[in-house]
Each structure stands twice: as structure tokens, then as C-alpha cells.
Image: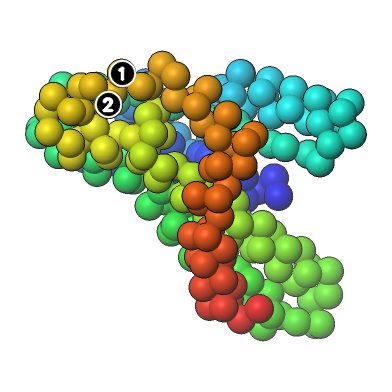
Amino acid sequence: MAIPVLFAITLHEVAHGWVANWFGDPTAKMLGRLSLNPLKHVDPVGTVLVPLGLLIVANLAGAPPFLFGWAKPVPVTVQNLRDPRRDMSFVALAGPGANLAMALVWVFVIRVSLLLGDDFGLFALWLMYMGIAGIMINVVLMVLNLVPLPPLDGGRVMTSVLPRQAALRFARIEPYGIVILLVAMISGVLWRLIGPPIAGLNGLLFGLSGL
């Protein structure tokens, strides 16, 4: 799972910065955040401490492993965008879009593994399992990030499309967004919301892969 996870979080963040640069904001480019080096996007808290802490707590409690985390957000200076409200929605959608594109690449990897078959033994099996993990990770990241809750990408899109006054009120949720998200995860509300689209997309992509 390591390779799909690294690609998923790295390309998700780079996509935000690349689209922001396309629309006139070079902030991420100037700070070296358009790099494909995963270390550039590691957040000490969100990428390391939170997932590790959740694994430790789950282990001590004898509960199933529960993972949640985030990469270091790519900085975007909204004022530099040519049309800030419109362009920010494209910047926000770039991350989930990158995850969808990567999921399709992993579909191709699985098809290659099936073509290689028994002639390549363990290597073909490794490719297949990596492709399966790649599809599942990217679908979860895409659907989760489209939830309309700031600071998720879906929340950014909502802020861009709502009328100005409603957008300002909606944006005030952001300081509490992660807490709301964690409560929704732990209570099971989030999974009831995003479970069906995740299952549907996984089914479609696994069907395309030939599995």
C-alpha cells in the first residue's frame, strides 16, 4: 500500500498547486510545492502523529485499526487568481480529479498484471494487489474530499459557488471542520454518506480492471 498512498497524497496536493499556477497564482511553485517528492508534502501532525496515534489507541483498545490523516496543504493565494471565486473551485476540484485519474492508472496496472499472469508469478501478483490498493485509496480520498465541509475540497467548492454572504457564513465553519469530520467518522454518519458512492465507484473501476 505504501506506493499507492505516496502517489495519492503527493499528486493530490501537486494538482492543487499546478491548477492554481495555471490560473495565475505561483505561490506553490515559488515555494517548491509542485515537486513530486513526497517529503515536500508530509505534515508532521496529519501525516505522521495522527495516523500513528490512532493505530496505537486502536491497538491498546483492542479495536480494528482506524486510520485518518492528511498531507501538508499546498498554499494558494486566492487574491492572485484571475477570478478568485471561479478559479478557486477549479483549484479545489483538481485534487479529487487527480485521485480519479490515478485510480484509472491503477485499473491499467491491474489489467497489465492479468496479462502477465503466471509467467511472471509473484511480480504479477504484487502488481495486482498494488493496483487494488491504489483504486481503493484513491476512490476514498476523492469521495471524502468532495464532502461539502471546509477545509475539505468540497467545502472550498461550496464557498466558491454560494452567494457571497452565504459563502462568508459557510466559511466560518472551517476552524471546526476537522473536529466535525472526526465526530462524523467515529459516529458512522460519514460512512453512511460516502459509503454508497465509494462502493459504486469501486465496483465500476474493478469491473474495468477485469477483476
For label 2, the residue is: 170
Rendered view: 195 above or below 182: below
Question: In the image shown, does 114 or 95 lie closer to the viewer?
Answer: 95
For the rendered model, the colour scheme is rainbow
Residue beneath label 1, please? 172
* Residue visible at 27% across and 26% down in the picture: 170
Asked if the residue at tag 1 contacts the one at tag 2, i.e. Cβ–Cβ closer than 8 Å, the answer is yes
Write down the quadrant of residue 14 in the picture.
top left
- Image side of residue 64 versus residue 155, left or right: right
Considering the image in quadrants, where does the C terminus appear? bottom right
Instruction: Mark yes or no: residue 15 visible.
Output: no
Check disc 1: other Cα within 10 Å, few if <14, some if 14-19, many if 20+: few
Q: Amino acid at mark 2?
A: Phe
**In x, y percent, where is residue 73?**
43, 27
Which residue is at 50% across, 49% downward? 193
Q: Which is nearer the eye, 13 or 199?
A: 199
Give the residue type at disc 1: Arg
Label 2: how many Cα within 10 Å (few below 14, some 14–19, many 20+): some
Seen at 32% across and 28% down, the residue is 29
Query: In what element is the residue under mark 1?
Result: loop
